[in-house]
Image: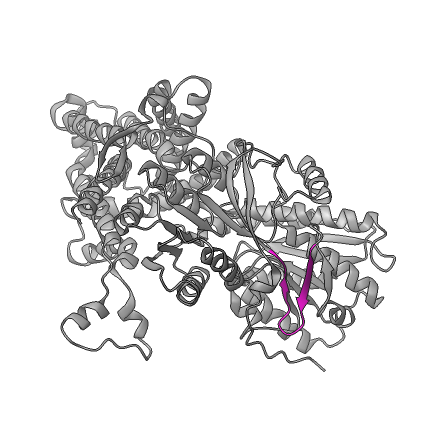
Amino acid sequence: MMSNGYRTGLTALALGLGLSALAVPAMAQVKIAFIDPLSGAMAPIGEHGVKHFQHMIEKINAAGGVNGQKMELLTYDNKLSPQETVIAAQKAIDAGARVLTLGNGSGAAAAMIDFVNKHNERNPGKEVVYLNYAAVDPAFTNDKCSYWHFRWDAHSDIKMQALTSYIKTQPGIKKIYLINQDYSFGQAVRKAANEMLKAKRPDIQIVGDELHPLAKITDFAPYIAKIKASGADTVITGNWGSDISLLLKASADAGLQVNYYTYYAGGAGGPTSVKQTGLKDKVFQITEGLANINTKENFAWEEDFRKKSAGHGWWYPRVRNEMDMLAKAMNEAKSNDPKVFVEKLRGMKYKDIYGKDTYMRAEDHQFFQNIYISALTPMAGDMKFDEENTGWGWKLTATVPMGETDVPTSCKMAKPS
Amino acid sequence: MLELVIFSTLNGVLYGMLLFLLASGLTLIFSMMGVLNFAHASFYMLGAYFGFQISQWLDFWVALFVAPVCVGLVGAAVERWGLRTVHKWGHVPELLFTFGLAFVIEEMVQMIWGKLPVDYRVPRLLDFPAFELFGTTYPAFRMFMLLISVAIFLVLLMILTRSRIGLIIQAALTHPNMVAMLGHNVPKVFMMVFGFGSGLAGLAGVIAGPALVTQPSMAHVLGPILFVVVVFGGLGSLPGAFIASLMIGLIQTFAIAINYSIGDLLSTVGMARPVQGMLSDLWQVTVAQVGPVVPYLMLVLILIFRPTGLMGTRES
């Protein structure tokens, strides 16, 4: 995303100084450090993340906090850069935080895991823990797994496992075109799609396997011409940010009516462009939850949050899971020390907002939950929430139960002594 | 196959013409003042946002005429009260000034219109497929963009080569002192050219906004490629910029359509494709993947072998 690092860098500097000054110490004693891009092209996503964590911390504090203490959020801007992430993490630790959370960008997340491992080795008795709410590179809970890292989002292989399980039940899908961004995440999506489709639906033909530069394309029309020429009926893409909106827009212009299975069509600006394109019931998203799952608790939660965030939805059901489970672990362990409560998080069972069972796998610290496939469509039936005031919302298409996405792990976790 | 060739040509020409609209203003400014205007793509973004705002209040067709004028006025003001003051200290401060200006414009756009893309739509009158070929439609709005760009190119060419103003501008490019001696107000000419160049960028923004996505990062996606066009075509050369724009548009678009890699080439002549070892990835990289980098490669090569660019005449 950060092709022009210098540009983002300078703006970020100005903003970052302002933002970290905002973290005024209150009555709180348990500090949670939120580190994510709060400037540059990814800023809307980071800022919306802050609102999620603030909301959760308000709820936890209203319910009495943890071990009689209140939680407090410190926010840091990492400008989506691994170096800045490490600097921010050090600052957060100096400010007294022992729980660090970071989501966007697998590059930043990798740097964070590395940093936390080293920090804990060098500072016994002052261990910190990294809670990952969005970076989905599968390596983090496989080869690069760490005792001090926990992930609540389903990683990209799990999502692909869920998607291919669904595709297995759709005989109409015959020719698939893959288009992804040319970096670690896009390549992981492409690799998993190739392998899993071959295993589950060998009859499906993969008619295209495209990688394009990240956030550099101004017009996707040439790619659409290629997809059209390939005769594909379905496109699978991990694209996010402007790359997904431009892709969908170009598709509508060319009158290309294929199904899109996406990871991130729901991101900032995504639904607006799907609506503009008129791709009704054609754009799907694979997520761990959505606003329109009809349970009383979920609807009430969504409504409450939208009031506070100018109509923007609860994008990350996983933030609720993460913070709830953190509070639970701290309370059960009767300690706010990572070294003690981490043991409670490992293997923890939890009921999510939809009333479903979920758990944190102890072997690799990967969270498992139902995965949902939904389509963007005009509001109808029991749908309650639209996106970005478009009058279109996500409608549940399929639920892939937790058991079907149990991908094996190669993690060999060394438990620190 | 034929289908892909036709659509790639259309898309390539369209992208090239859009680049030309932006580059023509930039190349004029560049050659006159010796300043690489880093904020040029920001004027393009301003054009898109002004176009969006005016079409919200009034109508797209009003925006088409009013928004570029507004951007042009902003540009002229920037030259008059910004660049001209900074000019005293030489080229580097000028360059830094435009560099800073790009950030300021981006921040202001974010403050006024927010960080999310805005809902800037194709006008209803042009919201239909122009024609259908092999089952793929080509939107009327894209044809409209193409026609506008071609028309602007012709008008620009006429003004520069056939009119009195063009004569003065051309002369000011190469012999500013002589033109001043003859009684022309050179600083005023500079201001007009800067304003006009910005206005052209604004016009590109107004027509590209609905077709692409109008968002605060749109400037820095197009920024770097503009410099390639200007340098490749040759400083101050309008035909050079035109040829470079079209070349880059077509090369990028056609590259995307080509799926072959060096490995494929080797296997067609009967050699085994290396799958192991340090460089194994290199053989798998397709032309499509490197397509977007090709213009920058062209930039490097032209700087080495023909520093003045394709049709440039002046050294600096």
The answer to whether residue A368 is magenta is: yes
Horizontal arrangement in the rendering, residue A363 relative to residue A198 (left or right): right
Horizontal arrangement in the rendering, residue A279 relative to residue A307 (left or right): left
Image location (x, y in percent) of residue B313: 14, 44
In front of the other: B94 or B146: B146
The answer to whether residue B310 is magenta is: no
Q: Residue at x 17, y 77 (%)?
A: B271
Position above or below: B219 against A194: above
Task: Give the farthest residue toward the right.
Answer: A68
In front of the other: A229 or A103: A229
* Residue span colored magenta: A356-370
Image location (x, y in percent) of residue B66: 36, 20
Q: Quadrant of residue B169?
A: top left
Looking at the image, what colour scheme do you see?
one colour
Position above or below: B225 against B193: below
Q: Is residue A14 visible?
A: no
In front of the other: B11 or B67: B11
Task: Give the farthest residue toward the left.
Answer: B162
Task: Give the farthest residue toward the bottom.
Answer: A417
Horizontal arrangement in the rendering, residue B216 relative to residue B142 (left or right): right
Q: Residue at x 41, y 36 (%)?
A: A277
Image location (x, y in percent) of residue A97: 73, 61
Image location (x, y in percent) of residue A231: 28, 50
Q: Is residue B67 visible?
A: yes
